[in-house]
Image: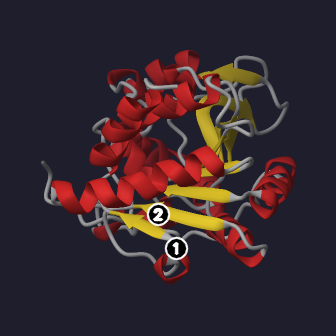
Amino acid sequence: MSEYSEEKSVFDKKFEELWSLLMRSRKIAVFTGAGVSTLSGIPDFRGKHGVYNSPWQGLPVETILSYDYFFSHPDIFYKWTEEVWYHLEDYKPNIVHYTLAKMEEKGILKDGVFTQNIDFLHQRAGSKKVWELHGSARHSYCTNCNGFYKYEEIAPIVQRGEIPKCTRCGSLIKPDIVLYGENLPMSVLRQAETVFSQADLTLILGSSLTVYPAASLPKLTSYYGGKVVIVNADPTDQDKDATLIFRDLEQTFNALDEALRSI
């Protein structure tokens, strides 16, 4: 058991209610954040031990990950991201990723998963419908000619300590990740607004719900009369709107994985 696990009697009663909600709901929305990835060993951003809590070489991480700073200091940007974003092949999907993929396969999650994560672990676990609200490290593009590059092409360059440049025109390559100062992909945001507005039930998994506009999406479910369940280690500003709150993702999804075997 982790420090966030609940006593079995308390947990079992709450899980029974969660399972009942899942089985009764026709439309379920899922919102995943960095806390899901930490189970795979990827550093959290805003949690107790999050990478945003301390400056990196004297610089706030949010500055390094800003759109303007990327263009003015790509060397520092790629030096930081090399440590966090360009060793993703070393990490494996965990029980949350696999269980969500299983729920989609069984027809429980018809609208897929909306994630703030850029690590593409949902896809590696087998999820087919993954809406990446903040983009993904899976692909990058040339900032001049829009040439397309896969993670497997860019990661070795960054790991060597080099700045990736376009093989066609020599211009700077940017990961297809939403940086501070950029807008979320409009097509993904509109899809999310539709799904969360119509959801009977929304699952918020491993998110501190502090990064907007993505964090506003679960509020749409509550506004239109749906239920919200939060599974996150730390309290969030939206806890007051939740029907159920769990603190341990692993405990919750081990139980959910076991329950899915009965259907």
Residue 129 position, x and y percent, is 70, 31
Between 46 and 252, which is closer to the camera in this rendering? 252
Residue at 58% of width from left, 62% of height from top? 66
Instruction: Work out whether residue 188 or residue 169 is closer to the camera in this orientation and state it.
Output: 188
Q: Is residue 160 left or right of residue 238?
A: left
Q: Amino acid at mark 1?
A: Ala
**Distance between the alpha carbons at the discs numbered 1 and 2:** 6 Å
Which residue is painted at 62% across and 58% down in the image?
202
Residue behind mark 2: 230
Query: Percent position (x, y) of residue 244?
Result: 45, 67
Colouring method of the image: secondary structure
Q: Residue at x 79, y 24 (%)?
A: 147
Please say if 114 is above or below 172. below
Pointer 1: what residue? 242
> In front: 250, or 156?
250
Q: How many numbered circles does the render carry?
A: 2
Asked if one can make out residue 36 in the rendered structure from this viewpoint, the answer is yes
Compared across the picture, whether 188 is left or right of 215 comes to right
Q: Label 1: how many residues lie within 10 Å, few (<14), some (14-19) or many (20+)? A: some
Q: Position of residue 200 (x, y in %)?
A: 71, 58
Q: Amino acid at mark 2?
A: Ile
Considering depth in this image, is 79 or 171 the residue closer to the camera?
A: 79
Q: Secondary structure at mark 2?
A: strand
Q: Position of residue 59 (x, y in %)?
A: 37, 67
Above or below: residue 21 compared with residue 152: below
Residue 94 shows in the view: no
**Horizontal relation, residue 255 to residue 154: left or right:** left
The local secondary structure at tag 1 comes to loop
